Amino acid sequence: MVQGRFDTCQRMAIADFDREMARRGVFCDLLTDYTRALTGSIMQSTACNAVHSIEQRLARWLLTARDRMASSEFLLTQEFVAMMLGATRPSVTLVAGTLQKAGLITYRRGHLTILKRGMLEDASCECYGTTAALMNSVTTHRERDRGR
Amino acid sequence: MLALAKRRTSHADSTRSGPGAVRNLLLAALPAADRDRIVPTLDVLPLKLREILHKPGDRLPYVYFPAGGFLSVVTVLEDGRMVEVATIGREGMLGISAVLGGTPVSSATMVQGESSACYRMPADAFRQEMDRRGAFYDLINQYTQALIGFIMQSTACNAVHTVEQRLARWLLMAQDRMESDSFPLTQELAAMMLGATRPTVTLVAGTLQKAGLITYHRGTVTVVDRDRLKAASCECYRTATAMLHDVLAARTGRLKSR
């Protein structure tokens, strides 16, 4: 389901996708590398869900959402976050309240704003940095290759 | 450790490569022509308890097809804690990273269930086979999808299911892979695998023991009442097992129809 609204999303018919993959060219390499990074992110989340606190995981989720939305402000219901984190709504309310009191975020009428990104990174677990680096690694070395 | 393992390997016998002779279920599900070509590229080694097959960031020189026992794929956190994300027994293969072109930087794999035999295939031979785009490629792709599904199930499971449900799930999967009701298990290792504390695992294992579902004696756990252990487990045991079985069931069905 869509969690962050955006004006455009490109789509490709599966038959075209299969044909492109069968060429075994740069598209196939890129998608394989992306699958590796995505699988790595999922494996990180598996561990994260087992051992990190809801506060750490909420901070991680907010930072990831911020990166994807390219904005420090976005819409969010607590009900939805609870579902995403596999937590109860009361615990999300509590934890979001803690982050707000500490001045890291504001949350009003379903509208979330990140005020202190650096502090939110400190409140998050290592998994934010690990998965962000994993995802960036897919595109950065290719940009470098293309530039030279 | 790998050097030690190497000395103990022997070549898989290509003259006995029928589906009955190959104990790994993925290899056994291949059409005979593909299996006869692949088996000579394999060697066989034992799986020793707690042996580490790869550490984070290692490039795997081999892919592994267990003939019994099971491997535990873990995510290693910065403080050295390890949490299990999937297990691989004789229904599967270690080395989807060879399909995906690299090992995730924070992943490691160790032996959790001993076995006298595990087939091993050099990464180059594996890539050559994959490049044929034949039955092996199809099967490994399906398995990779199922394993990723398994890991995703574990992601949700770790977020919402209790340690008791998850321990029950883990014990059932171990029982299936070991093909035995009794197997060695330290509480320390179980705690690590589940991402729980040791006292919690002690408490939960005690509850299962008092209820007569398992016995736990001197590092050996015995499943006494499998049905009730299933009831104590979450849906993830059934879901994850079905995902892995479907890979083989589809193949076996196709082979029969020939």
Image (cartoon, rainbow, N blue to C red):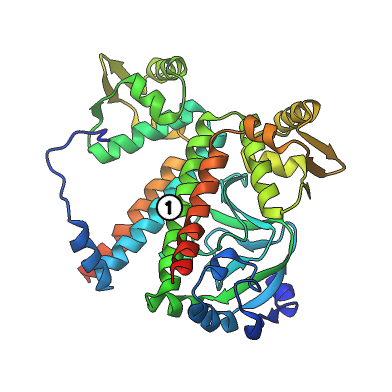
Q: Residue furthest front?
A: B257
Q: Is residue A103 above or below residue B72?
A: above
Depth check: give the residue in front, B180 or B186. Answer: B180
Q: Chain of mark 1?
A: A
Is residue A43 something one can see in this rendering? no
Quarter of the rendering containing residue B142:
bottom left
Q: Position of residue A70 (x, y in %)?
A: 23, 38
Residue drawn at x 74%, y 79% is: B7
Relative placement, left or right, of B191 versus B138 is: right
Residue type of the residue flagged with mark 1:
Thr
Which residue is painted at 56% across and 46% down in the image?
Answer: B78
Q: Is residue B49 left or right of residue A128?
A: right
**In the rendered view, does B179 fall on the left or right side of A122?**
right
Disc 1 packing (10 Å; few <14; some 14–19; many ≥20): some
Q: Position of residue A4 (x, y in %)?
A: 23, 34
The residue positioned farthest toward the left in the image shown:
A7
What is the quadrant of the N terminus of chain B in the image? bottom right
- Would you name the residue on which mark 1 appears? A39
Residue depicted at x 21% and y 68%: A19
Q: Identify which residue, B32 or A127, lies in the foreground.
A: B32
Which corner quadrant of the image does residue B215 belong to? top right
Can residue A2 be spotted in the picture? Answer: yes
Q: Residue at x 26, y 67 (%)?
A: A21
Nearer-the-camera pick, B1 or A137: B1
The percent coordinates of residue B216 (x first, y second) are 82, 38
Q: Position of residue B172 (x, y in %)?
A: 66, 43
Instruction: Give the quadrant of the C terminus of chain B.
Output: bottom left
Indicate whether B252 appears above or below A107: below
